[in-house]
Amino acid sequence: MFSRTLRASTTATSRLSQISSHINNSAIQRRMASTTALKLNTGATIPALGFGTWQDKDDQEKGVAEALKAGYGHIDTAAIYGTEPMMHWPSAFKAGDNKFPKDANGKTETADISYIETWKAMEKLIKTGKTKAIGVSNFSKKEMEHLVKEASIPPAAHQIECHPWLQQKDFSDWHKSNGIHVQHYSPFGNQNEIYDLGKNMGKLMDDPVLVKIGKKHNKSGAQVVLAWGITRGHSVLPKSKTPARIQSNLDGDFKLNAEDMKKIESIDKKLRFNDPSGSFGYQFYTDLDGKRN
Ligand SMILES: NC(=O)c1ccc[n+]([C@@H]2O[C@H](COP(=O)([O-])OP(=O)(O)OC[C@H]3O[C@@H](n4cnc5c(N)ncnc54)[C@H](OP(=O)(O)O)[C@@H]3O)[C@@H](O)[C@H]2O)c1
């Protein structure tokens, strides 16, 4: 079976330390100290507001430097984005130099290694002391239940597509009851340019419900999207290469009240933008909201 696993630890890489050596550390620490921190089941804390690095590979070094300067203390990187030397889906792809191997028809070439086997290998990384926490991405509920049953070390985090148009309330509750932290990827939904499905509809961040709530708090729709995730106790991973947006997204770290949250609940379209099942030849999200075919 193929597993679209994983984000092994967020230990600092030499790349990040090169970037951060140019930045005033005390200013970053002041800002980081003022942002919301959430607890992982390892006992460690994770900043609720993270920074995404998918797309725009060539802009990411600059983007990450901007983000660190602005005060982000949580950077979401992956080998597959070309921004990080660590593995993203360690057991799933055909072995070789190509990090994202594809056949002549453009289909992703996978390997027949179960995600449990991969997980057991990742558990060994924790024992080295170099990796502080391990987690997964893009698992279905059934896969999560299987993983939790077989694991010696439970996942610390699960990174999933989540935004006000794909709220995944039941799945989110399941994680809470199992002590697994949820991270929202593509927090702005169809703002990601490569999501074809989202092209002919308005932008999530312009949804009138979000904009109206934003006006009340003197915030933008984008900032309300981020606050919605953080109010749920999740972390959010907005990506931007634009300095002003990198800065303003940080101001999405605030709490919404119960009335705001209720209103946002009403705009859940169960609309999933990211589903590579066809190209991977593996059905993802089979028991989750927004699954298409
Ligand atoms: N595990 C997985 O399978 C997976 C899948 C998808 C994403 N991710 C992670 O999640 C991160 C975020 O997801 P994403 O990149 O799909 O999309 P996203 O963060 O929801 O949206 C990014 C887009 O929004 C724009 N944007 C950012 N802030 C904005 C603002 N304040 N106002 C208006 N537009 C704004 C960005 O434009 P500019 O850059 O031009 O400013 C970019 O086009 C990724 O970068 C990656 O780290 C993980």
Image: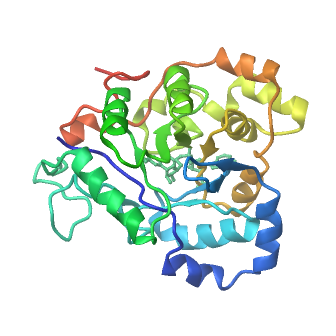
Tally of marks: 0
Q: Position of residue 6 (x, y in %)?
A: 37, 52
**Residue 154 seen in this snapshot:** yes
How is colour applied across the structure in the image? rainbow
Q: Quadrant of the C terminus?
A: top left
Q: Does residue 115 lie above or below 93 as drawn?
A: above
Closest to the observer, 29 or 133: 133
**Residue 139 seen in this snapshot:** no
Q: Quadrant of the N terminus?
A: top left
Q: Does residue 101 lie above or below 4 as drawn?
A: below
- In this rendering, position of residue 190 left or right of residue 146: right
Residue at 67% from the left image edge and 37% from the top image edge: 233
Q: Does residue 187 lie above or below 132 as drawn?
A: above
Q: Position of residue 83 (x, y in %)?
A: 44, 68
Residue at 21% from the left image edge and 36% from the top image edge: 282
Residue at 45% from the left image edge and 70% from the top image edge: 129
Q: Position of residue 168 (x, y in %)?
A: 52, 25
Q: Position of residue 258 (x, y in %)?
A: 79, 21
**Which quarter of the picture shows residue 286?**
top left
In the image as oriented, which residue stretches furthest toward the top? 266
Q: Does residue 116 lie above or below 141 as drawn?
A: below
**Which quarter of the picture shows residue 196?**
top left
Residue at 65% from the left image edge and 48% from the top image edge: 39
